[in-house]
């Protein structure tokens, strides 16, 4: 992958108590990421590579591969949530 | 039916506005300053909105900067965890005010632009506004805040190529090019505003090519002229489905234009809790879901796509808010829209929006 993923400018990941879920807030609207996407997004700090993110997640969840993280990030990039640094 | 919590709230803090745009979608009868909610009342609205699930607050108007308490309201909405968007004409936005709003948690600015060049833009705004907008955009970009430029398109400014170039020059992250919707004051100017088929045909390939060229740099959202379309817009993604509007006096509306539906029993935050209005009120439940639909909507394969179109348009054009949006080619009343489009292409003068009524 071309570098280190980070949330696009203006995108915020937060926890919504009303819905009991993580939500992504950005100018166009609100997205409710699934738990996998939320876990990936919380590690998108613009400093970590996909491999590093996958390694952190693999310590928490069994069987996480870098390809899984790449797939999630590709979907989030197409929704204009993530960009590459 | 299962009613989901609202995602967004359009907080119309005031109807006062320095611009006089002929396409203004606010009601013909504006809320006077004396009838506006107080600061404490707005703080209560924000608390109640977050409590029922609102995550996005659009501080709008009129011109929200006309409210001296805007910073306090931005703070509250941001502290509650909401994404706070300032919808502004840019007039009155100074470096100091913007710094303060950003410190308080402002996340995004949506700036209106009336035309591609100062002479035309100022004529449409009814005041010397254009230069202020260039300044406002620069201030937003200097603070690295995301910027959306919004242009209402109509017969007198339908130069999408030049507008896209301007937005690009302003450093916009998003550009909304929205053909005029005819609500509120704008309905008075429908003939003068309605773009011609030639304008729409010319715009389409430009928008398509520019969207491609600017991919990843500036997102272009083009809102079509619905009178010319075969199917209606998915208005509000369904009535009472995602968003609510609170008018300057505390009236709570399922869509920003809903006060045109004079048969709708509109509720107010001062007389009923916001939660009850969202879940239990007649105004929010009248056109929610699909049960209210008649034919041809009821059995239509597109009812989950466009939700029957726009209730306000059905009421304005047919006098019946439960009718299929007459823009729809499957509506038995499509002829009403066709007649409007076939009317001789006069070029009447704009009726400019006057100052707010002083009552």
Image (cartoon, grey):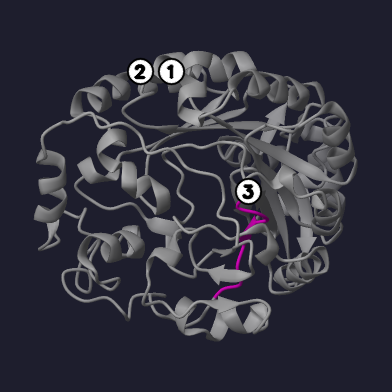
Identify which residue is drawn at 69% across, 50% down. Answer: A25
Identify which residue is drawn at 77% across, 65% down. Answer: B38
Q: Are marks 3 and 1 in contact (CB under 8 Å)?
A: no
Q: How many marks?
A: 3
* Residue at disc 2, secondary structure: helix
Instruction: Provide the chain ID for the residue under circle 3.
Output: B
Separation of residues labelled 1 and 2 (CA atoms):
6 Å
Instruction: Provide the chain ID for the residue under circle 2.
Output: B
Q: Main secondary structure of the magenta part?
A: loop
**Both on one chain, marks 3 and 1?**
yes
Split into 4 quadrants, where in the image is the N terminus of chain B?
bottom left
**For residue A82, side relative to residue B116 (left or right):** right
Q: Are marks 1 and 2 in contact (CB under 8 Å)?
A: yes
* Residue at disc 3, secondary structure: loop
Magenta stretch, residue numbers: B4-16
In the rendered image, residue B241, in percent from the top left (x then y), is placed at: 50, 68
- The residue wearing badge 2 is B206
Q: Earlier in the sequence, mark 3 or mark 1?
A: 3
Q: Earlier in the sequence, mark 2 or mark 3?
A: 3
Separation of residues labelled 2 and 3 (CA atoms):
35 Å
**Both on one chain, marks 2 and 3?**
yes
**For residue B115, side relative to residue A64 (left or right):** left
Instruction: Specify few, some or many for label 1: CA neighbours under 10 Å numbering under 14, 14-19, or 20 or more.
Output: some
Instruction: Provide the chain ID for the residue under circle 1.
Output: B
- The residue wearing badge 1 is B210
User: Is B10 one of the magenta-colored residues?
Assistant: yes
């Amino acid at each position: 992958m071309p570098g280190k993923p980070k949330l696009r400018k203006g995108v915020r990941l937060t926890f919504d108590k009303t819905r009991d879920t993580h939500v992504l807030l950005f100018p166009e609207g609100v997205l409710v990421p699934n738990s996998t996407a939320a876990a990936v997004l919380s590690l998108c700090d613009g400093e970590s590579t996909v491999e590093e993110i996958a390694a952190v997640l693999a310590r928490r969840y069994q069987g996480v591969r870098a390809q899984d993280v790449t797939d999630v990030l590709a979907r989030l990039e197409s929704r204009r949530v993530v960009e590459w640094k | 039916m299962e009613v989901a919590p609202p995602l967004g709230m359009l907080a119309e803090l005031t109807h006062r506005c320095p611009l006089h745009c002929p396409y203004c979608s606010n009601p013909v009868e504006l809320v006077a300053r004396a009838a506006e909610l107080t600061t404490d009342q707005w703080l209560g609205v924000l608390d109640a909105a977050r409590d029922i699930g609102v995550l996005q607050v659009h501080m709008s108007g009129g011109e929200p900067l006309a409210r001296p308490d805007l910073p306090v309201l931005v703070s509250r909405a941001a502290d509650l965890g909401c994404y706070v968007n300032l919808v502004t004409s840019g007039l009155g936005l100074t470096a100091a005010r913007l710094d303060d709003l950003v410190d308080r948690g402002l996340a995004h600015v949506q700036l209106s632009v009336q035309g591609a060049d100062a002479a035309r833009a100022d004529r449409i705004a009814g005041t010397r506004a254009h230069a202020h907008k260039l300044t406002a955009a620069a201030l937003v970009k200097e603070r690295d805040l995301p910027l959306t430029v919004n242009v209402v398109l109509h017969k007198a400014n339908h130069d999408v190529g030049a507008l896209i170039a301007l937005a690009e020059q302003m450093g916009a992250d998003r550009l909304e090019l929205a053909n005029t919707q005819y609500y509120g004051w704008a309905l008075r100017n429908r003939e003068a505003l309605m773009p011609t088929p030639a304008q729409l045909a010319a715009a389409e390939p430009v928008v398509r090519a520019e969207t491609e060229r600017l991919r990843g740099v500036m997102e272009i959202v083009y809102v079509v002229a619905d009178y010319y379309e075969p199917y209606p817009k998915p208005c509000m993604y369904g009535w009472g489905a995602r968003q609510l509007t609170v008018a300057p006096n505390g009236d709570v509306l399922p869509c920003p234009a809903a006060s045109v539906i004079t048969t709708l029993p509109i509720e107010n935050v001062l007389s009923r809790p916001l939660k009850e209005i969202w879940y239990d009120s007649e105004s929010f439940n009248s056109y929610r879901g699909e049960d209210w639909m008649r034919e041809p909507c009821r059995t239509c394969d597109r009812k989950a796509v466009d939700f029957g179109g726009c209730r306000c348009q059905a009421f304005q054009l047919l006098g019946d808010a439960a009718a299929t949006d007459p823009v729809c080619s499957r509506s038995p009343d499509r002829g009403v829209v066709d007649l409007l489009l076939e009317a001789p292409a006069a070029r009447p003068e704009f009726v400019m929006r006057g100052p707010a009524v002083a009552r």
